[in-house]
Image (cartoon, grey):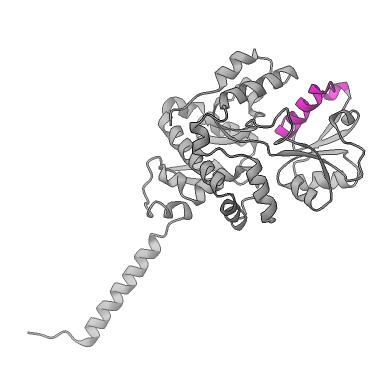
Amino acid sequence: MKKTSFFTKAAAILLTAVFSFQLASCTKVSPSESSTQGSAEYKYGKIDIPGKDGSLCGAPIYIAYEKGFFAEEGFDVNLISADTETRKIGLNNGTIPIVNGDFQFFPSIEQGVHVKVVDGLHNGCIKFVVRPDSDIKTVEDLKGKKIGVDEIGGTPHQVASVWLEQAGISALQKDGEVEFLPFADGNLELEALYNGELDVAAMWDPLGSVAEKEGKVRVIFDLSTDPAFAGKYCCFLYASEKLLNENPEEIAALLRAYRKAQDWINKHPEEAVEIIISGKYAQIEDKELAIELIKSYEYPSLEDRASNKQSVESDVQYFVQALYDIGYLTSEPTQFAKDIFVKVDV
């Protein structure tokens, strides 16, 4: 019987090792795939979800991605940057299945964007700030002032409008009782406040909260605690009407992923912040402040949902009525609220 030489055996072992290394290299998985045992197969395939806007309150997107909840539900998610118009187009044609957004989407739906509210995401995430030495303390002090916002028609603008109108101050530019100035960059909005170009900055978290902690501003309005807004969803999940009609089980699967993420954040806020900051998902580095903010958004746990702690439908109705009262919506509010909300069986 012919013996195998030492060199032949060594060569065979080396080839096996090289092959194994190459195979392992070719089958590396992303963080979101790893929690599903590295499966490369997804029931619903690859989808795009806007999730690179730097907001802290978008935490469920980041956590669903990093913890593998999207993958568990059958999605290979690609997080993208997308402005409001890109989101509307994607939702209309179904290339973007779901987005998180505030009640600023309600007028867009009235104007023909084909999306439906399918769930609530979290409570308040907007603050109005002034310089520390400002004499502005209440909404009544805003008459005749200049207010910075990210965009005319955006959520900070609409929230400010509701707040003003409920106090009897017209939010319409033509009436001249207040002036809104748009700033696409929140840092530029803060600079304008510091140098006196603005009296008030209406801002998304975390920029306003970071500036407050640094002693650079004073908060006069907090969406999470103001009596007119506290305990209500300010951010909702909007699904493509096209996909709701053609593939409702896909939307249901996405909602399950979001709800797993909300539940996980609710129960592990400190760990959630670690993931968000280390992944550079939000414009904040102060962990203590980020944890405080994450908790204030009151992401619903699965137990909260089971006990019906908060009603998405009621909150939609509330904000539809509020926007109707200030002239941002023209449709009969009760029916419109019913038309834009769809309860999805998850």
In the picture, measured across the screen, residue 211 lies left or right of residue 260, that is right
Percent across and percent down for residue 345 are: 43, 28
- Asked if residue 162 is among those painted magenta in the image, a careful observer would answer yes
Percent across and percent down for residue 239 are: 52, 31
Relative to 279, say whether 183 is above or below: above
Asked whether 177 or 307 is in front, the reply is 307
Quarter holding the N terminus?
bottom left
Residue 318 seen anywhere in this rendered image of the structure: yes
- Give the residue at x 67% y 50%: 290
Question: What predominant SS class does the magenta segment belong to?
Answer: helix
- Asked if residue 124 is among those painted magenta in the image, a careful observer would answer no
- Give the residue at x 41% y 31%: 249
Percent across and percent down for residue 265 are: 55, 46
Residue 193 is drawn in which quadrant? top right
- Give the residue at x 61% y 52%: 273
Residue 284 seen anywhere in this rendered image of the structure: no
Residue 346 is drawn in which quadrant? top left
- Give the residue at x 42% y 27%: 246
Q: How many marks?
A: 0
Span shown in magenta: 152-175
Percent across and percent down for residue 240 are: 52, 30
